Image (tube, rainbow, N blue to C red):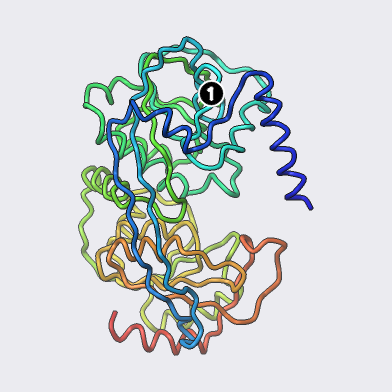
């Protein structure tokens, strides 16, 4: 019922905006509109993700074989001829009567017209606008979202631009306001004086560089390669160890019997990586030097893009939330992958996204005995 009411409200708001001369373009309409301005494109790719059995119960599949489609990715160099062209609070572009949709569903764009408060209007010749959605901290706004949907896209954009153009452009979108964001932007080449929060500044421009987001779970390999190339050229990580590591979580989706799990893992020479803020360089080093990684599903596993080929990721799930972000990234990176969930649901949360998980120590010990023979 709530979803239906929400959909009706979105439909009403879209119709109301159209009545006032504002049209929310779909992604397809946006790509057609921007087609004359393409400066770089990576083709769509399809790969088959292997079936993944439950590590403790091999007769049960956590994942069936899946066709993963990474959508075509673009960089557009938009030079509007229309005078009414500006950036909206959540990063999108309003040009004449059209609001461009470069990321996901267009209903998010309605939020731009519900935001209260004025913004400082500034003019700049060249704007890079990599993101066009409100950050709610639930659906969008975490570490995975920033690294895969913003930082990787910025590396794609940087590769497509002449160095002089990149050096002159300012960057504006609804900032995540985290330390990792500041570090990544610095590694990519953006100084604080060239970085603006679009919720505070209304940027008007002569030229605008845009990039699209493809599938949320299945980013284009070219984006990951561009990100690795840029960040590793700055940090120059070197593998000096082959560590077995456990990635702990202290917030949602934590292991409720973690003390017992850690006791087991220490018998197998695992290092416990506690859940606390770390610099990007530290995170890169931890994953670069890992040979076997285990832990509950969480954004930290975004860092498997720094792993060496052959590293093993063992992902722990609840039975109510099984998603394949990192199954996909593991296969892209040439890693080994396993998954596990306990067959009894904890039922301790109203939302599966937040549900804590329980692991059977006997099940995990049996799984580790099998998996570590080859790790």
What residue is drawn where x is 34% and y is 53%?
A: 282
Seen from the viewer's position, the closer of residues 299 and 61 is 61
Q: Is residue 47 above or below residue 264?
A: above
Image x and y of residue 360, in percent? 56, 84
Residue 67 falls in which quadrant of the image?
bottom left
Instruction: Locate the C terminus and report the quarter of the image it occupies.
Output: bottom left
What residue is drawn where x is 48% and y is 55%?
A: 276
What residue is drawn where x is 42% and y is 34%?
A: 31
Label 1: which residue? 98
Q: Is residue 243 visible?
A: no
What residue is drawn where x is 45% and y is 81%?
A: 53
Within 10 Å of disc 1 (Cα), the crowding (few <14, some 14-19, many 20+) is some
Residue 254 falls in which quadrant of the image?
bottom right
Left or right: 58 with respect to 341? Answer: left
Seen from the viewer's position, the closer of residues 374 and 260 is 374
Seen from the viewer's position, the closer of residues 359 and 113 is 113
Image x and y of residue 17, in percent? 67, 25
Left or right: 160 with respect to 52? Answer: left
Q: Element under label 1?
A: strand
Q: Is residue 319 visible?
A: yes
Please count the marks in the image. 1
Q: Is residue 64 above or below residue 142?
A: below
Q: Is residue 111 above or below residue 43?
A: above
Image x and y of residue 176, in percent? 51, 38
Image x and y of residue 311, in percent? 29, 70
């Amino acid at each position: 019922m709530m979803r239906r009411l929400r959909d009706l409200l979105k439909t009403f708001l879209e119709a109301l905006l159209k009545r006032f001369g504002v049209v929310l373009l779909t992604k397809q309409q946006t790509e057609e509109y921007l087609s004359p301005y393409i400066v770089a494109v990576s083709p769509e790719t399809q790969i088959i993700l292997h079936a993944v059995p439950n590590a403790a119960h091999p007769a049960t599949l956590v994942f069936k074989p899946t066709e993963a489609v990474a959508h075509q990715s673009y960089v557009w160099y938009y030079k509007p001829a229309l005078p009414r062209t500006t950036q909206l609070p959540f990063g999108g572009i309003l040009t004449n009567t059209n609001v461009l949709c470069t990321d996901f569903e267009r209903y998010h764009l309605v939020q731009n017209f519900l935001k209260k408060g004025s913004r400082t209007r500034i003019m700049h010749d060249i704007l890079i606008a990599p993101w066009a959605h409100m950050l709610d901290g639930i659906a969008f706004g975490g570490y995975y979202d920033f690294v895969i949907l913003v930082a990787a896209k910025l590396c794609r954009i940087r590769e497509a631009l002449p160095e002089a153009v990149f050096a002159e452009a300012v960057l504006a979108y609804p900032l995540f306001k985290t330390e990792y964001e500041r570090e990544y932007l610095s590694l990519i080449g953006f100084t604080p004086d060239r970085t603006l929060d679009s919720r505070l500044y209304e940027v008007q421009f002569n030229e605008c560089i845009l990039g699209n987001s493809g599938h949320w779970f299945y980013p284009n390999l070219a984006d990951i390669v561009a990100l690795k190339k840029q960040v590793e050229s700055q940090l120059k990580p070197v593998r000096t160890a082959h560590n077995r590591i456990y990635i702990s979580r202290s917030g949602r989706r934590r292991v409720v019997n973690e003390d017992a799990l850690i006791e087991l893992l220490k018998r197998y020479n695992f290092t416990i990586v506690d859940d606390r803020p770390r610099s990007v360089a530290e995170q890169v080093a931890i994953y670069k030097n890992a040979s076997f990684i285990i832990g509950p599903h969480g954004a930290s596993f975004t860092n498997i893009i720094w792993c060496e080929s052959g590293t093993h990721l063992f992902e722990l799930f609840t039975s109510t939330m099984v998603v394949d972000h990192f199954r996909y990234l593991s296969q892209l990176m040439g890693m080994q992958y396993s998954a596990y969930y306990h067959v009894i649901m904890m039922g301790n949360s109203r939302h599966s996204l937040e549900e804590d998980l329980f692991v059977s120590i006997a099940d995990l010990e049996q799984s580790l005995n099998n998996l570590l023979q080859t790790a």
